[in-house]
Each structure stands twice: as structure tokens, then as C-alpha cells.
Image (tube, rainbow, N blue to C red):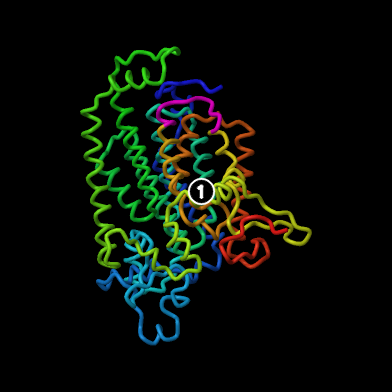
Amino acid sequence: MADTAPDHPHRHPDDARAPRASRVALAVYLVAVVVYALFAGDRLRSHSPDNHFAYLADSFNHGTLAVRCAADDARHVACPPGGGGNDWARYNGRWFVAFPAFPAVVYMLPVAVLGRDFPNRAFDVLLAGLAPALLYAFLDLLRRRGYSRRSWKENLGLTALFAFGSVYFFTAVQGAVWFSAHVVGAALGAAYLLYALDAASPFAAGALLGLSYHTRTSTLLAAVFFGLEAIRAHRRADEPDASADDDLLTRFARYARHTDWRAVVGKVVRFSIPVLVAIVVYAVLNKLRFDDWRETGYRHLQIRWQARILRWGLVNFHYLSRNLAVALALLPWISRVAPYVQVSRHGLALWVTTPQYLELLRPARTTRLATNLVVAALAVAAFDLMYQNSGWVQFGFRFSNDFALLLIGALAVNGRPWRRLGWALLVVAIGVNAFGAATFERAGNVYQGDNTAEGMFQPD
């Protein structure tokens, strides 16, 4: 059974010998970029056929929100690519990118210099190294503040788990619009954790979360982490120990009495200002594009399963059972012919791609910080699991990129020390996800050829 531990455990004996975090983070960035570039291979020389953010960046550079299409390109179904049939929105005779727009802002400079069809896949690889580097900085901050018992080497292992042992690996080497958003969103998410820890920098944390909301909508719910951290950071030192005989209501009342709510509210207000600005900006963009504050453009996508969006909406309990099956149950299929294994285009379960997440079901110890990280992860995951799309097409549950950093943080705080088995499982996770990074959207017969977004299980 896990023990309840204070939020400030003893520091690891390796602390005195730990190298400077900034140097390790830089090394992490460089190694990640090199590895991602090697797995991206020939993709680096061209742009993705689904380079929606490059088109939107071009629109921003020219002062418009609609896609700029030459008349001849439009007649030959070349603008947007594929005639708009792959997640492009059409409204009042014009084409739009419905996805949250901050990645397009990141693209604006290279588009201005190199043109709309610049090799965005290479640019994405350069961006992809940021999240692992910032994650290491966060894990080192946990160690230095005494929240984590991990050595710097274990922190490096946890960073490698995210960078190469999770679905972030295959995500980082694609360059298509859906994956570009995850790459930018993960970097913003890691930076957010750095500023949200201890609710230390409310305005900066709020600004980063606002940008994350303009990248991956579900990450707005990670605001829960800041709120819980503000409460944890402002607990009064004279709080009495809880009694095992106390009921839940008594525990809550004691917790409320011994919290400095004035300080908590002050920090939450400062945090909320940039978040609310981001929400308002999103609503204004919706109004300017689609004449409705609430319309993001997804109802105008030119896709085959548009009917279900119109019937059930973008987020609905209706989608939960399917998405739970995708996230928790899908396994590879064994075949008698090469390559002897097949993967559903809905991907593999989370515990298959990253088995280390299972440790969170029975942690070695519990702290309020670890609980805050897990609660925030569950809030973001709940939104993703009720979204109209399972993540299809994918190697593993790619929406986990929205909350994986929170789970890695919880593993750092309340997980068991890494001995031989821990390092061996890291090698397994890296091997599984290297397979995904090498095979996804490549020639071969690895992925079951269902193009309807409906099939999930091995056909009879």
C-alpha cells in the first residue's frame, strides 16, 4: 500500500554531483532533434501535404483569416490541398483552418521567409526538441525544491520516457497539422508546469496556458493544476494532523480552515486574466470567421463523418465508450505474413505504448503535489475521451500528449526508484515507440487499412 508522504522529502544523495540543469536540458534538446531527424528521414526535404498551419500563417502574414487561393489552383482542386477534403472548413465560399491557431503564429516567420510550402516537417523537428528539454527542467525543479526523490539520472530517464518512450515520439516526426499542434502544445505545457509549480508565477502560467488553449483546446482544463497548487502552497503551517477516524466532511472542513484563501484568490485572479483574454480572443476569431462567437468551424469541415458532429456535437458522452476502448484496450494483431504484426489505425492502448503509466495505479507514496498532477491529467483526459474523434489515424492514443507531461511529473514525485527493472521497461517503451515512429505513415502493411474512422477491432 502506498504511504502518505510530505511534499518535501529528503533530497537524493546524488544532488551534489548533479550537472547544471540548463546544460542537461540543452543536451536533451540536441539529442532529441537529432533522433527525430533521423526517424523523419526523407520527410525533412518536403512539406507535409497537410500543412494547414503554413496556409494559415500565410493568411496571417497577409492580414486575412481565410486561406489565400489563386483562382487557377481553386479550379484544379489544389488549394487547399486535396480540394479541402481533409479537415478544411468552408464557409460563405471561403476556406478556413478550423484548428486553434497559435501553431500558425509560430509558423509565420518561416513562411514569410521561405514561402507557404516551406519544409515544415524539418521545422517541426526543431520544435519537437523543446518539450523534452523543458520537461527535464521541470523534473530538475521538482528535485531541487525537494518534491522528488529522483536522481538527475532518473530524471533524464523520465525525460527519455516522454521523448522516445511515449506516443510523442511518432508525433514528433510527422509534420502534419494534427501532430504539429501536439508538438507546439507539449512545449507550452512543459513551460506552463515550470511556472505553475507552487503557483509561483501566476501571470506567466496563465499566459502560457492561454497560448496552449489556442493550440490544443483540451489543455485549458490543466488550469486545475494551478488552482490546486495555489491552495497547496498557501496551507498554514499550524495545520493539525488528520485523524484516521475523521470522515471526509471533517477533513475538508479542517483543510478549508487552514488555508490562506486571500492569497489563493489573489493568485488565481492574476492567473485568470491572461486565460480569460485568450478565451475572448478565440471567441472574436470565431465571430470574424464564422459569424458566431461559439462556432469554431468544425461544423463546416468537409469530412465524411460530419453527420455525427452535427448530431452529437464535438464533445459528448456518446463518444466515451469508443475512446476508452481506443485508449485502454487496443492491442496489436499478430499475422502469419510479413511484417507479422498489424496495428489498428486507431492505434494502441496507452499501457502498451508506455507501460510505466500503470505504476500510477499503485504509487509508492502519495503527496498533495502528485495528487494535483494526476487530477489535472484526469481533467484534460476527460475532455479528450469525450471528443468526437479517437485520434484516428495514429500509432497510439495521440491525445495523451495533452496530459502526458502531468503523468510524467506524477511518476517523478510518487513513483518507485528505478532499478534494473525500471531501466529495462524504459528500453521496452522506447523500442515500442521507435517502431511506431519508424513505421507510421510509411510504406508497408503494418496498419490495418480501414479508411472510415469507424473500425477499431481486428476484423473477423
How many labels were placed on the picture?
Answer: 1
The one nearer the camera, 406 or 219, is 219
- Magenta segment boundaries in residue numbering: 361-371
Q: Name the spot of residue 435 as percent of width and height, x first.
A: 63, 55
Using the image, determine if residue 411 lies above or below residue 73: above
Q: Name the spot of residue 395 as percent of width and height, x first.
A: 58, 56
Q: Name the spot of residue 321 as percent of width and height, x first.
A: 54, 48
> Quick one: label 1, few (<14), some, or many (20+) residues within 10 Å?
some
Q: Is residue 276 left or right of residue 12?
A: left
Q: Is-magenta flag for residue 408?
A: no
Q: Which residue is mark 1?
A: 320
Using the image, determine if residue 258 lies above or below residue 34: above
The residue lying at 44 percent from left, 69 percent from top is 119
Q: Residue furthest right?
A: 336
Q: Quadrant of the C terminus?
A: bottom right
The residue lying at 37 percent from left, 67 percent from top is 97
Using the image, determine if residue 198 lies above or below residue 402: above
Q: Name the spot of residue 197 as percent of width and height, x first.
A: 34, 35
Q: Quadrant of the N terminus?
A: top right
Q: Quadrant of residue 254?
A: top left
Q: Secondary structure at mark 1?
A: helix
Using the image, determine if residue 248 lies above or below residue 97: above
Query: Which residue type does callout 1 highlight?
Result: Leu
The residue lying at 39 percent from left, 46 percent from top is 189
Q: Is residue 337 left or right of residue 411?
A: right
The one nearer the camera, 312 or 35, is 312
Q: Quadrant of residue 286?
A: bottom left
